[in-house]
């Protein structure tokens, strides 16, 4: 199926889901048969969205599930984390390739993972002996064998060693490692590894449906499945959705009144990917606010905090024992490099929108707000450092608005606000925004319970639909900025909708 047709079909599914949400609000509560047909229609749209999610059955092409690009990074990145850390995966691979399959003989440049700059291979391997010295002979032979096996998959290997390296934390690696060791590099083993995430997502939505109901689960599934890039970038890899599973399970546990377990899932998610910290911070803030409101300690606050702390401590301790404490130092340095990277289009963040607005003339804003001639952040002269005070002021202002909104909502609404705090403070790749599927699920549950149309929920559908339309209008060069601009608008609409009325979900904790 062509990219154009696939995008049109996804737009239709998003429009259908949004229309069914509006229809649910306007159907008379006494019209039981019509409401039942609407409900079954929502299930059908969710099922079709799952089909769209797997690229209408084509997966990664020709029905192939394994994503070699991703498998390479996360197979070798977990199994040999102690030796290659977060900065030497490509250099070790180039060295191993010279002793083996010679798949990279034509590579002239590779990514320096300390800076994310592209450098000549000879420069990258100037201290290759030091990279090799971190391996024992047995481990080096195993690394070469694994690389030889992985390199047999058809993939653009010359480009892969110019990517951005392994991004999984040591806590993620200590969970992934047993699966990597168990299944290995054979084609069957790689397929089994690639299927792990699909099993996790399916299991997650079973728990979410039990907690929130089938209708809310269907809406959340639509947004998860139709988020751009998600399957193409993450599916068929190794535990790339462990953090999403953990965050989603925290939603389910919180909904069912199990705060310690909710905290434990969030604690692991934070150790695995760090940015789920904002989900925990949002819920923690609401629990504190509710404690003040009650004038006594909220009964869930300490249990949530204890669960989160215990899980994070266990994850850090286990991974430090497996890979050494230096792995965590390297991971911290890798995060710093990621946040300092100047720009590439596959990121959605407030920083891109802020720099676009402050660096543009009034005429440029008036004529190119949605279709700019150039993304200012991509220009060498434009740097967030120069505008740091203004950016921080905007971040603080938006965070304050979000916190007021969180305080006026309920515990579940607080959890659902996590992606907004991520958007304000971090630069996150596009494919992680499937976390908005969890937000949509909470909002759908609130709409169904209160029979009050959720404008922000319809807005999430509109953002992804607008993304596909933007691509089809040949404006894709600015798609990251465009979606970030719409996410900023969604943040404002959501915060305003909560601040303008007293409560939305009540005390769901």
Image (spheres, helix red, strand yellow):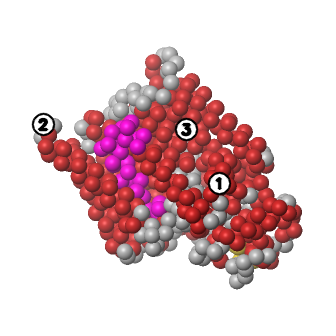
> Which mark identifies residue 265?
3
Circles 3, 1 touching at the beta carbon (< 8 Å): no
Q: Residue furthest top?
A: 296
Sequence-wise, the earlier of marks 2 and 3 is 2
Q: Is residue 146 left or right of residue 278?
A: right
Question: How many neighbours does mark 3 have within 10 angstroms: few (below 14), some (14-19), or many (20 or more)?
Answer: many
Q: Position of residue 350 (x, y in %)?
A: 51, 54
In the rendered image, residue 14, in percent from the top left (x then y), is placed at 31, 58
Label 2, residues with CA under 10 Å away: few <14, some 14-19, many ≥20: few
Q: CA distance from mark 3 to mark 1?
A: 24 Å
Q: Check disc 2 and report its element: helix, strand or loop.
A: loop
Q: In the image, 35: left or right of 96?
A: left
User: What residue is drawn where x is 13% and y is 43%?
Assistant: 33
Give x and y (percent) for residue 305. Answer: 58, 29
Segment colored magenta = 206-231
Counting residues from the N terminus, which is met first, the one under dot 3 or under dot 1? Answer: 1
- Disc marking residue 169: none
The residue under label 2 is 30
């Amino acid at each position: 199926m062509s990219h154009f047709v696939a995008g049109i079909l996804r737009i239709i599914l998003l429009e259908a889901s949004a229309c069914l949400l509006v229809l649910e609000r306007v159907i008379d509560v006494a019209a039981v048969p019509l409401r039942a047909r609407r409900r079954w229609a929502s299930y059908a749209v969710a099922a079709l969205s799952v089909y769209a999610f797997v690229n209408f059955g084509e997966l990664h092409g020709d029905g192939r599930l394994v994503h070699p690009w991703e498998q390479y990074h996360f197979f070798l990145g977990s199994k040999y984390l102690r030796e290659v850390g977060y900065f030497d995966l490509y250099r070790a691979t180039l060295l191993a390739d010279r002793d083996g399959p010679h798949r990279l003989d034509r590579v002239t440049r590779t990514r320096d993972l300390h800076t994310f700059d592209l450098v000549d291979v000879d420069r990258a391997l100037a201290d290759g002996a030091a990279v090799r010295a971190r391996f024992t002979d047995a481990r080096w032979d195993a690394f070469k064998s694994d690389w030889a096996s992985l390199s047999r998959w058809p993939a653009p290997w010359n480009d892969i060693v110019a990517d951005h390296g392994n991004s999984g934390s040591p806590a993620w690696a200590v969970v992934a490692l047993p699966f990597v060791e168990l299944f290995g590099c054979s084609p069957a083993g790689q397929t089994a590894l690639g299927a792990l995430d699909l099993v996790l997502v399916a299991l997650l939505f079973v728990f979410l449906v039990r907690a929130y109901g089938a209708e809310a689960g269907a809406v959340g599934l639509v947004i998860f499945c139709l988020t751009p890039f998600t399957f193409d970038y993450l599916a068929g890899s190794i535990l790339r959705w462990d953090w999403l599973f953990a965050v989603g399970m925290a939603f389910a546990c919180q909904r069912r009144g199990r705060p310690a377990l909710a905290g434990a899932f969030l604690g692991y998610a934070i150790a695995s990917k760090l940015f789920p910290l904002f989900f925990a911070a949002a819920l923690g803030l609401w629990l504190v606010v509710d404690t003040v409101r009650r004038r006594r300690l909220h009964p869930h606050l300490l249990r949530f905090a204890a669960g989160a702390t215990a899980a994070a401590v266990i994850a850090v301790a286990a991974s430090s024992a497996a890979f050494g404490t230096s792995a965590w130092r390297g991971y911290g340095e890798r995060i710093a490099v990621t946040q300092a990277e100047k720009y590439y289009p596959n990121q959605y963040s407030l920083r891109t929108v802020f720099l676009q607005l402050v660096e543009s003339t009034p005429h440029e804003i008036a004529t190119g707000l949605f279709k700019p001639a150039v993304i200012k952040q991509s220009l060498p002269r434009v740097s967030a450092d120069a505008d740091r005070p203004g950016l921080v002021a905007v971040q603080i202002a938006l965070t304050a608005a979000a916190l007021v909104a969180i305080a006026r909502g309920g515990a579940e609404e607080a959890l659902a606000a996590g992606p907004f705090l991520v958007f304000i403070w971090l630069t996150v790749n596009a494919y992680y925004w499937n976390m908005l599927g969890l937000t949509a699920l909470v909002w759908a549950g609130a709409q169904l319970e209160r029979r009050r149309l959720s404008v922000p929920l319809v807005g999430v559908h509109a953002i992804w639909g607008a993304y596909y339309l933007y691509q089809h209008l040949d404006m894709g060069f600015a798609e990251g900025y465009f979606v970030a601009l719409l996410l900023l608008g969604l943040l404002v609409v959501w915060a305003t909708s909560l601040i303008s009325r007293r409560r939305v979900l009540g005390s769901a904790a």
